[in-house]
Image: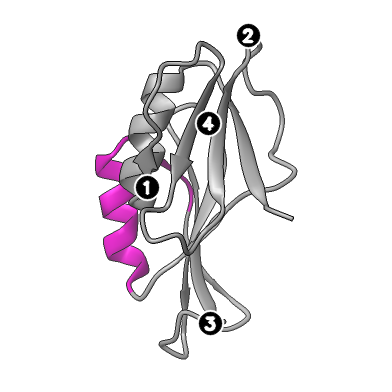
Amino acid sequence: MRLVWVLDTNDLHAAADFWCAALGFECEEGEHPVYRALKDPNGRWPDLLLQKVPEPRSGKNRMHPDLVVHDVAAEIERVRALGAEVLRPTYEEDGHLLAVMADPEGNEFCVVQRLDGTLGG
């Protein structure tokens, strides 16, 4: 079995630019009109497949990625510079600092820092 995450988007190119920069992924070569595959160059993480859809996002994501980092403040600034928006500023919960963010199309994700200084397992 192979796990691939699929993210609906209205703009394949903008979404690919954002998520490749945010995750350090590479865009698979080729220009498919509906799909764009993003891959971890080190092969550690599942692929992210962007799927162009006509309708805008509505409502809260039922699933979202967490970017677990050593420095939540620095990561928030980094992804904001890429076009992300802070939906909920940094707060502490259950031994973590986290912030709720949105990509340029409004898809939600979190930036998380474990207070024990590790990235977890």
- Give the amino acid type for the residue marked by disc 4 in the picture: Gly
Q: Are marks 4 and 3 in contact (CB under 8 Å)?
A: no
Q: Nearer the viewer, residue 80 or 5?
A: 5
Of the residues under marks 1 and 4, which one precedes in the sequence? 1
What secondary structure is found at the residue carrying circle 2? loop
Quadrant, the N terminus: bottom right
Q: Please name the residue shown 40% across and 34% down the image.
A: 28
Query: What residue is pinned by disc 2?
Result: 54
Of the residues under marks 4 and 3, which one precedes in the sequence? 4
How far apart in space, not on screen, are marks 1 and 4 (Cα)?
A: 20 Å
Residue 69 visible, this orientation:
yes
Find residue 74 and report its horizontal and vertical position in percent: 27, 63
Find residue 80 and report its horizontal and vertical position in percent: 31, 44
Write down the quadrant of residue 43 in the picture: bottom left
How far apart in space, not on screen, are marks 3 and 1 (Cα)?
A: 21 Å
Quadrant, the C terminus: bottom right
Of the residues under marks 1 and 2, which one precedes in the sequence? 1
Q: Please name the residue shown 31% across and 44% down the image.
A: 21
* Position of 8 relative to 20 (above/below): above
Of the residues under marks 4 and 2, which one precedes in the sequence? 2
- Give the amino acid type for the residue marked by disc 3 in the picture: Gly
Find residue 11 and report its horizontal and vertical position in percent: 46, 17
- Give the amino acid type for the residue marked by disc 2 in the picture: Pro
Q: Are marks 3 and 2 in contact (CB under 8 Å)?
A: no
Is residue 56 found left or right of 120 in the rendered image?
right
What secondary structure is found at the residue carrying circle 3? loop
Q: Which labelled disc corresponds to residue 25?
A: 1
Query: What residue is pinned by disc 4?
Result: 106
Q: Nearer the viewer, mark 4 or mark 3?
A: 3
Q: How many marks?
A: 4
How far apart in space, not on screen, are marks 4 and 3 (Cα)?
A: 27 Å
